[in-house]
């Protein structure tokens, strides 16, 4: 685990332990069961890929450790509306506060503004967080293999499935991919960002995408900013793209997404 990821996970574990004291799992579980039904994240992504060869997961985030503040004027609802109008298949919303300046209300606001399924993008380390994700309306969670061991990954995936959500399993290298393929989820995210340097390595990502079995659905994450990037990763076998920073840096993120789709 890289130093930055290790620090983020340590901070997240402390925050989750505090949150579990304030709201025990039994209470959070009941809130999760009362939430509106999941919208079918994986189904929406696969349907888009069948129509257009690939589906876009458009991301909503205010900042990141690698880029700092990304968008000064930040409205999750307006971004969600713009992405939906531009043809996104799904949304991804950062809810981590210390490193991404996100919060649960960002996801709630974005989901209420459109009909798209929403990925809660956060550092999932505890089943309590899965219940919390469903309680705030998430339709999918992110499981980062670099952040968890195999038993924890399996527990997170099972909890997600029990609530009717999908899981996007994120990997960065061959070892993580082999571990990810032991999980039932069909959604495999290949992150181009090196967690040790925070730099983008598209060549490594393309090689990993080629290694994803055809029965799984490969999602290219990070570093996507041009149609050439789309073509390169599609040629490698990607059928989904999680795109955020390159869109959010533009005055009109919806128009930027339209340009990529065309």
Image (cartoon, rainbow, N blue to C red):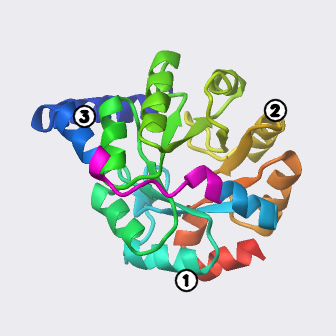
Q: Earlier in the sequence, mark 3 or mark 1?
A: 3
Side of 95 relative to 167 (left or right): left
Which residue is painted at 72% across and 44% down in the image?
Answer: 217
Give neighbour class at mark 2: few <14, some 14-19, many 20+ (Cα, 10 Å): some
- In front: 48, or 262? 48
Disc 1 element:
loop
Coordinates of residue 235 in the picture (x, y in percent)? 88, 52
Side of 95 relative to 241 (left or right): left
Q: Are marks 1 and 2 in contact (CB under 8 Å)?
A: no
Give neighbour class at mark 1: few <14, some 14-19, many 20+ (Cα, 10 Å): few
Q: Earlier in the sequence, mark 1 or mark 2?
A: 2
Point out the stretch of residues depicted in magenta. 33-44
Instruction: Report the Cα–Cα distance between label 3 and label 2.
Output: 35 Å
Side of 74 relative to 90 (left or right): left
Q: Earlier in the sequence, mark 3 or mark 2?
A: 3
Total marks in image: 3
Residue 255 sits inside the magenta stretch: no
Work out which quarter of the rendered image holds the C terminus and state it.
Answer: bottom right
Which residue was labeled with disc 1? 252
- In front: 131, or 16? 131
Disc 2 element:
loop
- In front: 197, or 232? 232
Q: Are marks 3 and 1 in contact (CB under 8 Å)?
A: no
Which residue was labeled with disc 3? 16
Residue 40 sits inside the magenta stretch: yes
Location of residue 259 by image quarter: bottom right
Indicate which disc residue 211 carries.
2
């Amino acid at each position: 685990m890289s130093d930055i990821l290790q620090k983020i996970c340590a901070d997240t574990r402390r925050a989750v332990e505090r949150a579990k004291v304030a709201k025990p799992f039994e209470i959070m579980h009941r809130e999760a069961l009362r939430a509106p039904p999941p919208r079918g994240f994986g189904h929406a992504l696969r349907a888009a890929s069948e129509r257009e060869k690939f589906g876009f997961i458009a991301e909503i985030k205010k900042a990141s450790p690698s880029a700092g503040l990304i968008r000064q004027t930040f409205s999750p609802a307006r971004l969600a509306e713009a992405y939906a109008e531009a043809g996104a298949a799904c949304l991804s919303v950062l809810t981590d506060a210390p490193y991404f300046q996100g919060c649960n209300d960002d996801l709630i606001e974005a989901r209420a503004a459109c009909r798209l399924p929403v990925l809660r993008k956060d550092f999932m380390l505890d089943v309590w967080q899965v219940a919390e994700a469903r309680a705030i309306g998430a339709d999918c969670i992110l499981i980062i293999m670099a952040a968890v061991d195999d038993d924890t990954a399996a527990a997170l995936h099972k909890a997600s499935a029990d609530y009717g959500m999908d899981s996007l399993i994120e990997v960065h290298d061959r070892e993580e991919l082999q571990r990810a393929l032991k999980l039932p989820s069909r959604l495999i995210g290949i992150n181009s960002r090196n967690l040790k340097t925070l730099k983008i390595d598209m060549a490594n990502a393309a090689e990993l995408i080629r290694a994803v079995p055809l029965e799984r659905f490969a999602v290219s994450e990070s570093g996507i900013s041009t149609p050439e990037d789309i073509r390169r990763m599609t040629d490698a076998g990607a059928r989904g793209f999680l795109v955020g920073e390159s869109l959010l840096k533009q005055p009109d993120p919806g128009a930027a997404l339209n340009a990529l789709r065309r």
